[in-house]
């Protein structure tokens, strides 16, 4: 599935959720991610830290597919690869979407983000695509995640894998 069609599906699900009759579920979500990062031109190891702010909604409880969750989110963070002879320090800011479901105490998600990125004294972009499995409480979730990143900054494309943990608090604050 192409990025354009998956964004279209996410947008359609969000619109249906917000425009449908009945009570829709909607919450503000604030999260943090910490990851071990591996890859780049020198196959180096490093770390990544991200902060997320999003709006999470689902289908109304009257719908048969009420356990589907769509979360639009802003994200910003850093990736630090400890490469020799020079470390690679990447700063990012962007947005994306999480799509998943509520399965009792667990929430599996797929996610994708598009970020402006600054590294090596130049600007470019970083795209990530991955999955997460969260253990869900009433207003808090903790989980594990994997993402594959594509960083495009001169002189070219670098790819990374991220393995990590995250947490998120949710509430009806807005």
Image (tube, rainbow, N blue to C red):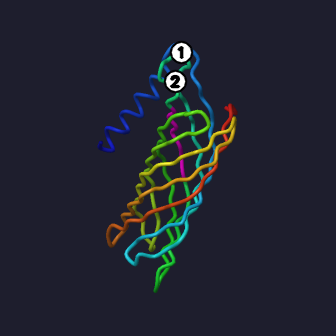
Front residue of 51 and 62: 62
Q: Quadrant of residue 165?
A: bottom right
* Residue found at x 45% / y 61%: 117
Residue found farthest to the front: 104
User: Does the magenta segment cover residue 54?
Assistant: no
- Mark number displayed over residue 12: none
Direction from residue 76 to residue 140 in the image, left or right: right
- Mark number displayed over residue 62: 1
Mark 2 highlights which residue? Answer: 66
User: Alpha carbon of mark 2 to alpha carbon of mark 1: how far?
Assistant: 7 Å
* Residue found at x 51% / y 55%: 93
User: Does the magenta segment cover residue 73?
Assistant: yes
Task: Reply above or below: 68 against 61.
Answer: below
- Where is the N terminus found, in terms of image quarters? top left
* Residue found at x 52% / y 53%: 145
Q: Quadrant of residue 141?
A: top right
Front residue of 46 and 118: 46
Percent across and percent down for residue 104 are: 59, 33
- Is the residue under label 1 in contact with that under label 2 (CB below 8 Å)? yes
Percent across and percent down for residue 140 are: 68, 42
Q: Which residues are magenta?
A: 69-75
Q: Quadrant of residue 134?
A: top right
């Amino acid at each position: 599935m192409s990025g354009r069609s998956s964004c279209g599906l996410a947008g359609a699900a969000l619109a249906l959720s917000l425009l449908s009759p009945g009570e829709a579920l909607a919450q503000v979500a604030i999260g943090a991610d910490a990851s071990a990062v591996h890859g780049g031109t020198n196959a180096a190891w490093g770390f990544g830290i991200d902060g997320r702010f999003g709006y999470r909604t689902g289908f109304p409880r009257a719908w048969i597919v009420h356990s589907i969750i769509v979360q639009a989110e802003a994200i910003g963070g850093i990736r630090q690869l400890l490469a020799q002879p020079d470390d690679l320090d990447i700063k990012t800011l962007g947005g994306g979407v999480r799509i998943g479901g509520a399965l009792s105490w667990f929430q599996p998600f797929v996610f994708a983000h598009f970020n402006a990125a600054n590294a090596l004294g130049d600007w470019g972009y970083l795209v990530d695509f991955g999955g997460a499995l969260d253990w869900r409480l009433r207003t808090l979730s903790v989980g594990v995640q994997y993402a594959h990143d594509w960083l495009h900054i001169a002189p070219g494309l670098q790819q990374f894998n991220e393995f990590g943990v995250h947490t998120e608090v949710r509430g009806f604050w807005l």
